[in-house]
Amino acid sequence: MYRIFGRVPLNSLRFKLINIIIVIAVPLVLLLIYFSQYSIKVVHEQVAKSNKNLLSMYMEQMDGTLSEVDKYLATLGATNYDLINLASFARENDYAMAKVNLSNRFKTDLRLYPLIDSMFVYVPARDDYFYIFNEGSTLDERLHVKMYISERVRSDARSGARFLLDEWEVSQIQGEYYLIKVYDYGSVLLGAWVNVRRLTLPMNLINFGETGRSFYVTDEGLPMEPNGQYASIQIDVTREDDYDYLIKENQERYLVIQNRSRVGAFSLVALVQEKSILDQLPILQNLVQLITYGSLIVLPLAFILMQRTVLYPLNRILAALKFTRDGLIEYRIENVKTSYEFQRVNEAFNQMMSQIHKLRIDVYEEQLGKQRAELKLLQLQLNPHFLLNSLNIMHSLAFMRRYELIQELCIIITQYFRYMLRSKVTFVPLEDELKHVRNYLRIQELRFQDQLSYEIECPEACKQIEVPPLIIHTFVENSIKYAVTMEEPTHVTISIQETQEPEPRMNIRIADNGPGFPDDVLLTLRNGEQIQDEEEEHVGIWNVQRRLELLYDGKARIGFTNLGQGACVELSLPLA
């Protein structure tokens, strides 16, 4: 069958893409949905929530005990006579009796707090440290803590620091971590401490997997077991979702569950081995393996199929578009066996490029004819404009009865019209254009007598370069019209230079010392617009702009500026 489902061909790209999506995407989506729902239900609800409740319950119990000890120490320090006056006893007997009373009080009350390893009193003035302890701590451990407290007090005295008063402080002593609470009454320190390692012993009874376990961490995320298995890991204790995120350690993945203490700068963390969770979920484990192995097989095949049916044809189209963008409109897409839609696109592209090629030739020929007709029309428009000005000059000389100058003027005008008849051509040598400009300036010089002077600078190498006729004359004529007055002498300068950087060009500069361009006229000229007024002034300037655009295909440049005194026009014509 060539067609199926009505008008959709079997070879249609639409049909192929639908089949690819159905074959690949639907099974994977269904498996991923099932996997996602099942894993969220089992892992989050059964593991994270239950373990979080255990941690919260244990932490709350421990925080409650530490808070009670905190209140006990605060009450004892505020009410016990022996403690308040311990440092002020002068007689040794009184001091010894007070120590005995405090020790008996501690011995009785410490039984109420089995979580606490020891309570102590330290008198800095006597460097006397005495304590009562529960079972579990060793003698060496108690001595290390004693040395730490005394050294810490002396160090704080020198630096002006003090123990934390508002929470239990985490301290590392001889490789072990301790929670220490100290009340500093100036002359006497009252406190208690507990080894963090012993606090985690009840949590070890909970099964967190073969390698999972619980431990305490500091507010910096460092485990409080420097010689333990997890001493090198970093726990992110700043997370708002304080459970249910994974870390990898020693080639194992762990579910992190944590609970922060409210009485100290530490948190209780449980690492639940992910493998132990999956061991209890064989169906979920099989799904993960099925998705993994299935993806390794199906996705490469799907990519190859997608590449053959979509990517290769698209690359051919993109290559054709690139060639046409670079101007190679004769390029055509090769007719190869591909999907139905791409075959239609290739055929349409080839037909379109053939039509564009034909239209481009027709438009190019039409534009050439239009440019030639427009250029001739623009040249003819200049002839009567200059003729009227010349007759006005001759009329002025005849009125002044300067017949010898009229004779000279007639010769100059004859040369002028001979040049105008010749100017029907597209280009003339620069030497002929400058000769024509000199004739025009001579006519104006005869008219204005001592009020006009001019200077023309042109290298010999530039005189044979061909330029459009009347491009210099037009701007010189404009300078005479607007710059020459009977009050101040006017000087016109024409300078021509040839440059090779960054490309071969000839620069022509026409400047005068008159009043310059009016601001509105200057803005209009810079925008390349035609100035419209009743007397049709500045038409010649717009004609030059239009001719340069047609003859040099937009590569010629023209600039208008006002100098400190006078107007300046700069032409830049390409030589190549």
Image (spheres, grey):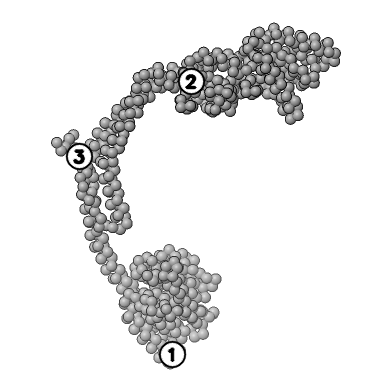
Residue appearing at x 37%, y 83% in the figure: 416
The secondary element bearing badge 1 is classed as helix
Viewer-proximal residue, 284 or 574?
284
Residue appearing at x 49%, y 77% in the figure: 493
Q: Tell us which disc is closer to us: 1 or 3.
A: 3
Mark 1–mark 2 CB contact (< 8 Å): no
Residue appearing at x 50%, y 21% in the figure: 271
Mark 1 or mark 2, earlier in chain: 2
Query: In the figure, 158 relative to 526: above or below?
Result: above
**Residue at which label 2 appears:** 211
- Amino acid carrying mark 1 in the image: Leu
Mark 2–mark 3 CB contact (< 8 Å): no
Q: Tell us which disc is closer to us: 2 or 3.
A: 2
Q: Position of residue 335 (x, y in %)?
A: 20, 49
The label shown at residue 11 is 3
Left/right placement of residue 163 relative to residue 553 reads right
Which residue reaches farthest right?
91
Neighbour class for label 1 at 10 Å: few (<14), some, many (≥20)? some
Query: In the figure, 512 relative to 101: above or below?
Result: below
Can residue 33 be seen from the camera position used here? no
For the residues marked 1 and 2, what is the alpha-carbon distance in whole angstroms? 119 Å
Mark 2 or mark 3, earlier in chain: 3
**Residue at which label 1 appears:** 405
Q: Quadrant of residue 78?
A: top right
The secondary element bearing badge 3 is classed as loop
The quadrant of the image that shows the N terminus is top left
The label shown at residue 306 is none
